[in-house]
Image: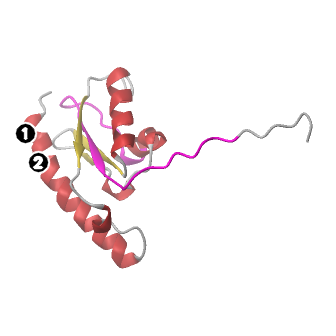
Amino acid sequence: MVGSSVSTKPEILEGPSEPAMLMMKFPLHSKLPSVPELKAKFVRFGHLYESATRVFQNSSTAKVVFKNKSSAEAAYNHAVLNRTFLGNIKVNYRLQVLNVSAPELPESGESSKRLRKDLLNQRLEQFSSCLCTQVSP
């Protein structure tokens, strides 16, 4: 058709899933974001393992797990450059690539969901313990 143009976005193809976790350390006694708030803030950077998003009130920490490392890196870079991204408080960010291969994280079926969640939770607990001891306020 004359005068009509169709704009097409090039499709971005991502390689095999390489999950990564963005860990956040908040000042003691500060108001922490809720899990839904974290999901809403970070989903714009890429797909999340939503059930792995956690807020730990006792240690003033939180974690968001992205399905792809590149998404987590984009979120990390944005948060570090925009210091008020999560409010007017000083948040320390740390990025951790998870050593979980895609076959270990099946995508469908109830038993697969349970297995994926169990595997992620195991890995996340290991890394969360590092967060509490390595990131200083």
Q: In which quarter of the image is the N terminus?
A: top right
Q: In this view, does 14 lie to the left or right of 122?
A: right
**Disc number at residue 133?**
1
Write down the residue under mark 2.
Answer: 129
Q: In this view, does 30 lie above or below 71?
A: above
Kindly identify the residue that appears in the image at 34 percent across and 78 percent down: 111
Indicate the position of residue 78 as horizontal and vertical percent values: 38, 28
Residue 80 in the image: x percent, y percent?
A: 32, 25
Residue 10: percent from the left, percent from the top? Answer: 60, 42
As drawn, the label of residue 65 is: none
Mark 1, secondary structure of its residue: helix
Q: Is residue 93 above or below residue 56?
A: above
Q: Quadrant of residue 103?
A: bottom left
The reply, left or right, for residue 12 in relation to residue 57 is: right
Name the quadrant containing residue 50: bottom left
Labels 2 and 1 touching (C-beta < 8 A): yes
